[in-house]
Image (cartoon, rainbow, N blue to C red):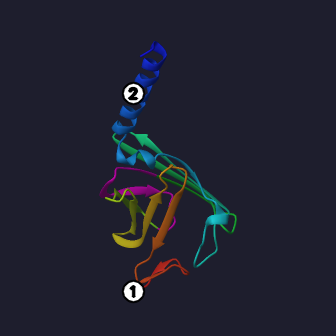
Amino acid sequence: MTTKWRYGLLWLVLFALQLAAAGPSDIVMGRWVLDLNQSTYSPGPAPISQVLVYERFRDGFRRTGDTVNADGSTTHQVTVGKFDGKDYKVEGAPTNDTAAFRLTADGSEEVVNKTDGKVMNTNKVTFSRDGKTMTQTQTFPAQWDPKLGIHVT
């Protein structure tokens, strides 16, 4: 085997080891920009734009969300948490004060948003194999009226 092939093989093995060492949450990390042409909002209206950033922080992550809402107002949300299913404080969110994050066996993320301990919505977030597309499906409990933005009791 020539030296050139040895270095190529060594590089390939090191790259494979790096991928194998990557944790399951690695695909979540990064900057995610909403593509309105590929999105459906029911009920609407859709935001004008939205960017979510997941970054490693201490022994967990920090999620920052910046949204320009349909009416032109802006929202800046920050959450520091872990993928352990526990509630973490959400700063700046208009509809929830905590969020619980966990990674599921199928590689997706589940986010449960709550206000005063009541579930406001649950997001199932899936990621494409190439790590370029995030798909988020939001469900609301029966007593939630998303049009009004209130919990109906």
User: Is 78 a magenta residue?
Assistant: no
The location of residue 78, given as percent across then percent down, is 48, 52
Q: Which residue is mark 2?
A: 14
The location of residue 88, given as percent across then percent down, is 36, 56
50 w.r.t. 43: above or below: above
Q: Start and end of the magenta stretch? A: 79-95
20 w.r.t. 152: above or below: above
Image quarter in which the N terminus is found: top left
The location of residue 135, given as percent across then percent down, is 51, 62
Amino acid type of the residue that numbered disc 2 sits on in the rendered structure: Leu
Mark 1 or mark 2, earlier in chain: 2
Amino acid type of the residue that numbered disc 1 sits on in the rendered structure: Thr
**Under tag 2, what secondary structure?**
helix
Q: Is residue 24 left or right of residue 149?
A: left
- Crowd band around label 2 with a 10 angstrom C-alpha radius: few (<14), some (14–19), many (20+): few
The location of residue 53, given as percent across then percent down, is 52, 48
User: Is 90 a magenta residue?
Assistant: yes
**Under tag 1, what secondary structure?**
loop
Q: Which label was assigned to residue 153?
A: 1
Q: Is residue 55 in sight in this rendering? A: yes
Q: Which label was assigned to residue 38?
A: none
Looking at the magenta stretch, what is its main secondary structure?
strand
- Crowd band around label 1 with a 10 angstrom C-alpha radius: few (<14), some (14–19), many (20+): few
Q: Residue at x 34, y 52 (%)?
A: 83
Q: Residue at x 39, y 34 (%)?
A: 16
